[in-house]
Image: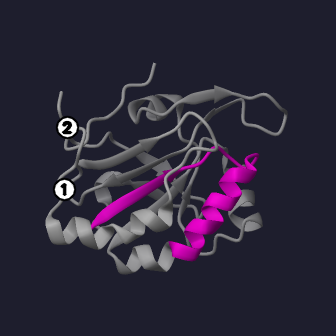
Amino acid sequence: MPTTPTPGAPAPALTVPLIIGTEWSLDRQEPDSFTMIVVYRGLHCPVCKAYLQGLKALYQGYLDKGFNVLTLSMDPEDKAKKAHDDWDLADIPMGYGLTEDQARDWGLYLSDSISDAETSVFAEPAVFWVKPDGTLYMAAISNMPFARPDLEFLLGKADFIAEKDYPPRGTHG
């Protein structure tokens, strides 16, 4: 059973390989505003393709607002590379091989495959914002491919959050 991480508390550790042959680690990120982690279901998911292509259109805007961005799935390297190439995601960093334990640490819902195209077990979608100090700011975790936050809307709130020093919500134990 996943345990939902608490906003305002340290984000769970996360280190994953990238499709470019290097390693990405949350504790080595130094964003000006947030690190955004976008978990997608995998190459098999057409909704993920559309969502990440939407992110591509907004990617420079996120960089301009001081974000580091990572897309991530439980897919193996070959499927992650194919998704990145086939979906034309350009410079957006993509991690792969998220483990079941890591997914549970982040409170992700896990699903079993229902077709041969799917990875046998995969994480359902989520978007996280982590502050530069390593604390979790926002967690939008879904159990269905159809329920995801609007990335353009979120980008539009980055200035408001900074100007108002808006705190993480959902912190009451």
Seen from this angle, which residue lies furthest left?
Answer: 165
Q: Which sits in the foreground, 126 or 101?
A: 126
| Local SS, label 2 | loop
Residue at point 44%, 54% (across, down): 37
Labels 1 and 2: the sequence-earlier one:
1
To which quarter of the image does residue 172 belong?
A: top left
Q: Amino acid at mark 2?
A: Thr
Task: Name the foreground residue: 28 vs 112.
Answer: 112
Real-space Cα distance between discs 1 and 2? 17 Å
Q: Residues within 10 Å of mark 1 (few under 14, many from 20)?
A: some
Does the magenta-highlighted stretch encompass residue 38? yes
The structure residue drawn at horizontal position 37% and vertical position 25%, both measured from the top left corner, is 3
Counting from the top left corner in percent of width and height, residue 34 is at: 31, 63
Q: Amino acid at mark 1?
A: Asp
Above or below residue 22? Residue 102 is above
Assess whether mark 2 and mark 1 are in contact (beta carbons under 8 angstroms): no
Q: Which mark is residue 133?
A: 1
Is 14 a magenta residue? no
Residue at the disc numbered 2: 171
Left or right: residue 40 versus residue 130 is right
**Residue span colored magenta:** 32-58
Q: Quadrant of the rendered structure where residue 131 is?
A: bottom left
Q: How is the image coloured?
A: one colour
Question: From the viewer's perspective, is residue 145 above or below residue 87?
Answer: above
In the rendered image, residue 40, in percent from the top left (x then y), is placed at 59, 48
In this view, the mark in front (1 or 2): 2
